[in-house]
Image: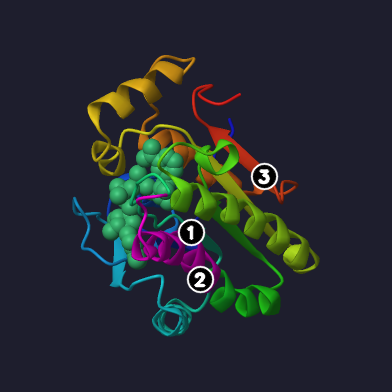
Amino acid sequence: MIKIDLKGKVVIITGAASGIGHSTAEVFIQAGATVVGLDIHAPSQPLKGAQFLEVNVANSANVGKCINDIIATQGHIDCLVNNAGISKDAPVWKMTESMWDDVIDVNLKGAFNCIHHVASHFRERQLGKIVNVASINGMRGKFGLANYAASKAGIIGLTKAVATELARYHVNVNAVAPGLIATPLVMSMTPEALAKSKSEILLGEPGQPEDVAHTIVFLCSDLAKHITGEIIKIDGGQYI
Ligand SMILES: NC(=O)c1ccc[n+]([C@@H]2O[C@H](COP(=O)([O-])OP(=O)(O)OC[C@H]3O[C@@H](n4cnc5c(N)ncnc54)[C@H](O)[C@@H]3O)[C@@H](O)[C@H]2O)c1
C-alpha cells in the first residue's frame, strides 16, 4: 500500500484561510505534517491542527519576519506552498494601474518574497520542497485577465528559474496549474463567464479544492523526489 507520511515535516501554506489553501492544509494535516498557514484573513472554517499567522505576502519585510519566527519556534521548514492569490479582472483598456499592481504584488511578488526568505534555510539544510500555484490562464491567457494571466505566467517562469538554482541543494521546485476549481475565488465570476469556463472542461465538472491539494501534497512527498521544474495542470482537460 502506498501511503504519504509527512510526520515531522513543517509546511508553510500561504492563503490557507480559504479554498485550495485551506483544503491543502487539511490534506497535509491528514498526512501528519505540521502546518503553518500565512494569510491576511482568519480561516473560513476552523482548521484543527494548523497554526495561522496573519501576514500580507506582498510585504517582503513582514514575510521575512514570519519565516524567521517559524524557524525559531518549529526548528525548521521543509515545504513551502505559494498559494495566496487574488484577481481583479477587466479588459486591458479598463484595467487601472492599481488593479495591475495589486494582482502582481500578491500573486507573483508574494511567491518571490516567500521563496527569497526561505531559500537560505533550504540551502543550509540541503533539502526542501516548493510548490507554486499557477493557473491554466498563465499558459493560455484569457479575456479580462491581463494582470492575473501575467502573474501566473510569471509564476511559471519563477518556478523554472528557481528549480535550476536550488536543484544542487536537493530542493524540488514545481508548480500546479489548476483550471476552474469550485472555491470562493470563482464565485466572483459572472454567471456567463462561469458557464463558459464550465463548458470547456472535458471531464464535465469544475475541480474540487482537494483535487489540487492532493497533487501539491504528492509533490512535497518522496514519491515525487525526481520531479523538479515541472508545471502540472489540474483542470479536467479544460486546456489541452
Ligand atoms: N479557484 C480556481 O478556479 C483557481 C484556478 C486556478 C488557479 N487558482 C489559484 O489558486 C490559488 C488559491 O485560490 P482559491 O480559489 O482557493 O482562492 P480563495 O480566494 O478561496 O483563497 C485565496 C486565499 O489567499 C488569501 N490572500 C489573498 N491575498 C493575500 C495576501 N496579500 N497575503 C496573504 N494571503 C492572501 C485570501 O485571504 C484567501 O484565504 C490562487 O493563487 C489562485 O489564483 C485558483
Residue assigned mark 1: 82
Quarter of the picture holding the C terminus: top right
Q: Is residue 107 inside the magenta stretch?
A: yes
Q: For mark 1, does the 10 Å Cα neighbourhood hold few (<14), some (14 to 19), or many (20 or more) residues?
A: many
* Distance from mark 1 CB to nearest ligand 1 atom below 8 Å: yes
Q: Secondary structure at mark 2?
A: helix
What is the x, y in percent for residue 189? 27, 36
Whether residues under marks 2 and 1 lie with C-beta atoms below 8 angstroms apart, the answer is yes
Residue assigned mark 2: 114
* Distance from mark 3 CB to nearest ligand 1 atom below 8 Å: no
Q: For mark 3, does the 10 Å Cα neighbourhood hold few (<14), some (14 to 19), or many (20 or more) residues?
A: some
Whether residues under marks 2 and 3 lie with C-beta atoms below 8 angstroms apart, the answer is no
Start-end of magenta stretch: 93-113
For image coordinates 48% across by 59% down, the residue present is 82
For image coordinates 31% across by 27% down, the residue present is 194
Q: Earlier in the sequence, mark 1 or mark 3?
A: 1
By secondary structure, the bulk of the magenta-drawn segment is best described as helix
